């Protein structure tokens, strides 16, 4: 099971972030990324919201660093660790805009992009960006197909119900022959979308029993058996891990994730300072 982190500082959720994050910046984020890389972690994450309504900030938080400049900086100070958007909202972007911007990130990072995407759930933000809300599910399915046709192609071509393009050059494009695409979500629909159209499923806000139930039902479907490659399952722990303070408890949780079929963990930690966060990184790496 690979290890990644839900990067601190870049997203601050109410009652879930540490006080030190409020005054931290790119230097602290870079230290975390370099420490994680040195310890063998596979990826760091950054999420996306353009603007959060004041009324929603109490639940969702208001701080969301943009993935492109954040990862562009981190690419310059690291060598191996991958950069996972966790997640981009597909309805906010034309597929070719994603292919160009994140294809460029793949170039400058030396092929370290993981494109995590989602359907979106904040209607006010859709309205602000003139994005389609009612048909966002079907539009996202079409965008995923369009992205697979475009991400690594200098002259992409695609025709679908929502997106159509051809006769255009996108240069640079991703240098990976196959950019991994993960679908984020917490429903059976998001898992079905991942099974049929992507490389991985990145659930959030679900307990182990809920994850197990959704995965067992999905494995019984024809779509799962028709896959030509295994589905990555990237889980997030539903409560912060304290590997330095509770190593046995954390070890048991890791075993549970492996048993339910997780291929990677995007870890959240109990942490009270930057130094403590880095200590937790090391403690979890030692446990695994």
Image (tube, rainbow, N blue to C red):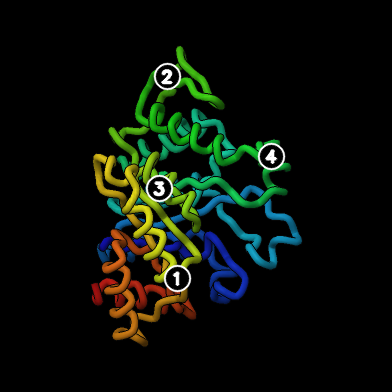
Give the mark toward the camera: 2 or 1: 1
- Tell which circle, 2 or 1, labels the residue nearer the N-terminal end: 2
Are the residues flagged by discs 2 and 4 in contact, CB closer than 8 Å?
Answer: no
Q: Which residue is mark 3?
A: 182
Q: Element type at marker 4?
A: loop
Q: Residue at x 47, y 54 (%)?
A: 188
At x 39% / y 67%, what residue is drawn? 267
| Residue lying at 32% horizontally and 44% vertically, measured from the top left | 222
Rendering coords of residue 192 (x, y %):
42, 47
Measured in 3D between alpha carbons, the distance from the residue under mark 1 to the one under mark 3, in whole angstroms, is 19 Å
Between 83 and 92, the one nearer to me in the picture? 92
Residue that carries the numbered disc 2 in the rendered image: 157
Q: Up-down: is 177 above or below 240?
A: above
Q: Check the picture and name the quadrant holding the C terminus.
A: bottom left
Q: Where is residue 17 shown, x and y percent of the image?
A: 55, 72
Residue 27 visible in the current orientation = no
Label located before the other in sequence (2 or 4): 4
Q: Which residue is under mark 1?
A: 207
Q: Is residue 55 left or right of residue 219?
A: right
SS category of the residue bearing label 1: loop
Nearer the observer: mark 4 or 3; the answer is: 3
Element carrying mark 2: loop
- The front one of 152 and 258 is 258
Do the numbered discs 1 and 3 sit on residues whose CB atoms are within 8 Å?
A: no
């Amino acid at each position: 099971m690979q290890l990644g982190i839900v990067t601190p500082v870049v997203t601050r959720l109410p009652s879930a972030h540490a006080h030190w994050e409020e005054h931290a910046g790119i230097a602290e984020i870079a230290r975390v990324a370099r420490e994680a890389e040195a310890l063998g972690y596979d990826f760091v994450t950054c999420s996306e919201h353009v603007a959060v309504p004041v009324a929603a900030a109490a639940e969702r938080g208001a701080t969301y660093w943009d993935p492109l400049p954040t990862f562009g900086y981190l690419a310059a100070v690291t060598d191996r660790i991958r950069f996972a958007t966790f997640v981009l909202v597909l309805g906010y972007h034309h597929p070719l805009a994603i292919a160009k911007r994140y294809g460029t990130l793949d170039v400058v990072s030396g092929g370290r992009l993981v494109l995590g995407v989602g359907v979106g759930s904040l209607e006010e933000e859709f309205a602000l960006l003139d994005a389609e809300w009612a048909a966002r599910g079907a539009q996202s399915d079409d965008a995923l197909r369009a992205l697979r046709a475009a991400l690594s192609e200098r002259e992409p071509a695609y025709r679908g119900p929502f997106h159509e393009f051809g006769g255009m050059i996108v240069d640079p494009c991703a240098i990976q022959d196959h950019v991994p695409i993960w679908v984020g979500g917490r429903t059976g629909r998001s898992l079905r979308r991942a099974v049929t159209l992507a490389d991985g499923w990145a659930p959030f806000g679900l307990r182990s029993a809920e994850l197990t139930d959704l995965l067992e039902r999905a494995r019984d479907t024809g779509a799962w058996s028709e896959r030509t490659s295994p589905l990555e399952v990237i889980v997030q722990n539903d409560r912060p891990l304290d590997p330095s303070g509770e190593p046995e408890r954390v070890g048991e949780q890791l075993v549970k994730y492996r048993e339910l079929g997780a291929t990677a963990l995007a870890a959240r930690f109990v942490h009270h300072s930057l130094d403590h966060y880095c200590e937790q990184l090391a403690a979890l790496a030692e446990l695994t």
